[in-house]
Image: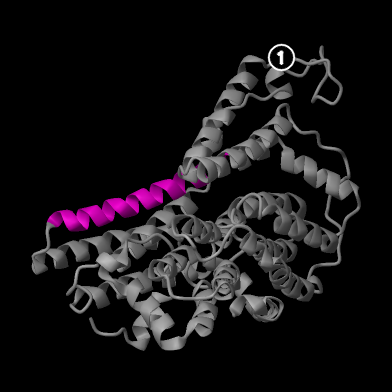
Amino acid sequence: MKRPSTLTLILLTCLPFGLYATETAPSGLTGGWVGPAVLAVFGLAYLLVMLEETTHLRKSKPVILAAGIIWVLIAIAAGQQGLPPGQVEQALRHNLLEYAELMLFLLSAMAYINALDERQAFEALRSWLVRKGYGFRQLFWITGLLAFFISPVADNLTTALLMCAVVLAVGGDNRQFVLLACINIVVAANAGGAFSPFGDITTLMVWQKNIQTHPGPVDFWSFFHLFLPSVINWLVPAALMHWAVPKLQPQGSGESIPMRRGARRIMALFLLTIATAVSFHNFLHLPPVIGMLTGLSYLQFFGYYLKVSRRPSRKSGDEESFGDPIPLEERHPSFDVFHQLARVEWDTLLFFYGVVLCVGGLGFLGYLSLLSQTLYVDWGATQANIAIGLISALVDNIPVMFAVLSMMPDMTTGQWLLVTLTAGVGGSLLSIGSAAGVALMGQAHGRYSFLGHLKWTPAIALGYAASIGAHLWLNAGLFA
């Protein structure tokens, strides 16, 4: 199979996540008409995604259409080559399974976020922060710090969604603050997830590879060598953005807004759900999505409890006291978990569907294995691992890391940690480079955007370079 051209490599950097095992790609398809056609279709679709703010075309629409066209082209080309029809069908079903796991994981997490929002948890936090007298600059650092330290325990996507909800509640109509705070959250969440096996899917993949292959690339405790480089990755751009944050106070009367009944228990159930997902994967070797769906059932049963136990309460601190003439429905609003599921950001979930199937088609054609071969054979480990992070600015890091782990190049622990770091934090360079950024574009639609994030890419790139330098210096002994 011939080597990819420079144009092909550039187009391949538009790969998001989800892929089919490229080492089994059928020969002959990439070199024919279908390869360039598929690249052109996907490149055009992703260009429309990046222009969403200008065209006002929801990002899910072009990639869903592109996914259908790509697999039609592959099926036609496979028929012309005489390949068994079941081979294309098997590849497509594999990608649908990849998407189903991702969608159900996100659906469960988003349901909890919406439930906490409905129970006024974020409004209560907003009112508390306002009453504490924190300005926008202080809130910028508080949300960033929380994102950095919550992300290693939860995952960076869930953490970003939580912190963004707080920012939207506090920031109100101040677009400048919301934009900068969201950028800060994306950078902090991605950086925090890079030094923990549970902080990001890619770190989990690397750690799981260590379990599957003895000795593997990185053991559990080796990840924590990346703590200081991760801190530097976040602090450098945050320090530069600090001066652009409006020096204002959030608007608000300062009145206390109480959480509705059950809010604290939903928080506890959310933490229990995260623990369930981690435990299912770590101890039972089950997909984390099974743990998340099991955790969603916690919320369903608790919602049933809230429904059957709705009655006026004499407890202090509740919305109203017993005997208040306000109707019960207003005093203790009913809770419906399916209403929270209906409120999830479906544009984001459908966008994930489109990119998973698009990249699945490109992986089936064999382009991803060609890209990995070019990077590690021609460029060398250090240059390739740094480039992996830059590619992650346009591509979600999951397929890139999957390709690296599939190749299993002979690298030292320091090099494996380098690619873990760059793949984790490189996605912060652009809003479309990580699941956290993509999700926040949907959650803060109209205020946090691709172009808004792009203006601060130089500052984020400076932090990216500083974190790499810190790793090469602090962990020099691991490169021997």
Residue nearest the viewer, comparing 28 with 119: 28
Q: Is residue 270 left or right of residue 319?
A: left
Query: Is residue 338 in the magenta section?
Result: no
Q: Residue 215, percent across and down?
A: 49, 63
Residue identified by numbered label 1: 311
Part of the protein shown in magenta: 85-111
Q: Residue 96, percent across and down?
A: 33, 50
Image-quadrant location for residue 306:
top right
Residue nearest the viewer, comparing 158 with 271: 271
Residue found at x 57% / y 73%: 422
Residue found at x 33% / y 77%: 370
> Is 229 drawn above or below residue 194 in the view shown?
below
For the C terminus, the quadrant is bottom right
The kind of secondary structure the magenta stretch mainly shows is helix
Q: Is residue 311 left or right of residue 29?
A: right
| Residue 447 visible within the image | no
Residue found at x 81% / y 22%: 320
